[in-house]
Image: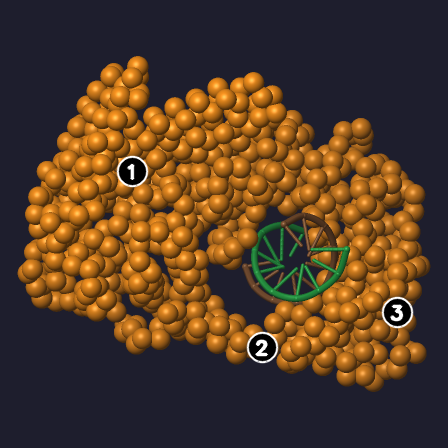
Chain colours: A orange, B brown, C green
Amino acid sequence: MYPCLTQMSDIEELSQPQKRRRVDSGVKRSTYGQNTTLAHATAAAVNGVAPTGNVLRSLLKGSSQNTESLKKENGASIISELLKTAIPNKENTMPGHSASHTQNLVEIAQEEAIQMSTDNTANNGCNGNGMTGGGNDVEMLQAKRARVENIITNMRQSPSRSEMLGGGQLGSSRRKQRQPQQQVNSMGGILEPNRPRKDQERERLKQQLHEMQQQMERLQKKYFELYEQESSTGDDSDVEVIHAAQKEGGKANQQEAEGQESQELGPSHFFERARALVREQEIAARQAHLNRAQAMLASISNNNHRSNFGEALKDKLTKAVTDVVDSVVREYFPSQPTSQITTLHHTHSSGVNGGLNGQGDISRQSVHPAAQAIHNFSDFHSTHIPYHPISSEAFDQTEALPLVVSRKKEGRLRVKQGNHRVSANANTHSSSLANCLPTSVAIPNPSLQQTLPIVSAAFSLHHHDEQAKDYSARSLESQDVPTPLTDHQILSNGSPSMGDVHHAPEGLSLSLLKAECGDLQDLTDLSAYGSPKGSPPHPGSQGIQNSSLTPTHLKKAKLMFFYTRYPSSSTLKQHFPDVKFNRCITSQLIKWFSNFREFYYIQMEKFARQAMSEGLETKDLHVTRDSELFHALNLHYNKSNEFKVPDSFLVVAEQTLSEFFNAIKAGKDLEASWKKNIYKIISKLDSPLPEIFQSPDCMKELLGE
DNA sequence: TAATTACCTG
DNA sequence: CAGGTAATTA
């Protein structure tokens, strides 16, 4: 099913024989530095696999060609991942579609994905099915476009539907059809593989596309007429309308159920059905409203439910409306693929949307009808899915997707998956705002230059997380929603790269995450600490709690490291009284110490090995202020050397060095997580921090000494 | 599931 | 140093 995936994992196992091994396993949280004796029940689990030593690769980094080959896989693997996660969800949300159909979609998309990957990377590490890697890119693109347009054409050919719908023989014929080499168009003409014919075909398809667009416009008009009629007559007598429309809807259903095979009716029939369906949907919406109203009457006296009621009412309302719009879009889309696709393209490249990381997705929802329509249609015609980066994105959708958006609570905005690309691209861009942010905040997506200020502005008004997220979401929404169906220009720009498609959402979610992290820092905060890096705000400004960490804080943290390698978060809170702590700040501080440790242990191992190679003995190992090791460390944590490093640190350093030395000497460094024990020992050697560190002004005093 | 840590990468 | 992932515990 997923040749790429299986190959990937094979390769991964070959090239990354050492799955990451936790070295801290068994060490209780927040007990570092406290003499708690721990039962390390999990040690066994860690030793399950025993590959090569967990040696510092950064130090001993030879020529790891395996990582090279791994990188080459990414193009395909990412797509595969997408498919893997997207398809199963489809099954849930589209109950009407058979498993075999979905499976075919998977295969189709899978093959397309493989092609994409071979297009995009010169190395096609994972094309298990013998793709000719030398294929010319333009050719590929054209083939893809042809396929897309082929679909569109098929949609128009209502007479041919009946055969396609025949039911049984989906499998093999579909597979053949989607092969890029041959292109049997729906008119029955067989296209020869040579170029001129292709171009001709494309021309013709384009024309047809145009016609479809015009038809679409007409349809829209009709719809609006209908809608106006409905709303003028319907308001007073909902019940009647419901009955009337139920009849009509019933008719439509009948036609749908029995009549799909006998669709020699052509476009006019399609319009009729669309109308009926729309009507039906509207009625359903009305009924929902009525039900709601009844429920309201029933429960209005009940105070307990009052608050829930408002929520529920809102919910239902939005849902009803969205259902209507949704169904219309679904009906319309087949005849109007371009507008959807352009919309898609636009929203993605605008970078304003899709930020909520998959769930609670705001603007990406406008995409969804496309996915469904594609789904429906491929079912209809048992033909192949047009591959487009967008369509793969569309498959990512997992739920009904209204153009009118019902906001879900987005819970936590977390950046979880597929971020390598982003972080790789990201750092090259930075917004002016990013420069203002103190020690860490970099905004990866250039498009955020527009969005972030909006978000921040909203946040400045509302300090509470939820409210703020609401605001940001709405501001995004309002930018996004008006654009659909009007933007045709973008299609001509060609298809976006996969990177683009995924870039924007990630970037946005990052920004939201940041915003959340900063506990919605005020603009005042930003301006107060907005001064460029060289001139960090002096902590003299007491009383004010920073909602961000400054370079000064970093310095202080480094000095603290001389005392405590494993500070608990409560310790951190105690010693950074001028910092307004939130989740993000805390984890940033923790991350700092984690980085400090990393450096520390790397140095220790390095020098321990060095001592080994020099043939020294354990008793010869001493760390003094003159030691090379100390200099390295001091340079890292106390660059200006204005702070007098406590003797206790020298002791700890010496012991750490000895531990490493002994372990290496005993050959323990060949064990899976040999550093674990050392970490455990060192974690108990934290010493209490001097009082000065609790003062907000300590840096002045410390450096003044 | 959140928190914490190690490890990796840029 | 930060971003990300994986592993592990509570």
Above/below status of A427 relative to A550: below
N-term-proximal mark, 3 vs 2: 2
- Give me the residue at 89% from left, 49% from top: A689
In the image, is A525 to the left or to the right of A277? Answer: right
Q: Decide if residue A507 is in sight here.
A: no
N-term-proximal mark, 3 vs 1: 1
Residue assigned mark 3: A655
Residue assigned mark 2: A17
Q: Give how far across and how far down residue A312 sits, in percent.
A: 49, 29
SS of the residue under disc 1: helix
Which of the two marks, 3 or 1, is nearer to us in this view?
A: 1
Marks 1,2: beta carbons within 8 A: no
Label 2 is placed on what type of residue? Answer: Pro
Instruction: Tell me the chain of label 1.
Output: A
- Are the residues under badges 3 and 1 in a single subunit? yes
SS of the residue under disc 3: helix
- Are the residues under badges 3 and 2 in a single subunit? yes
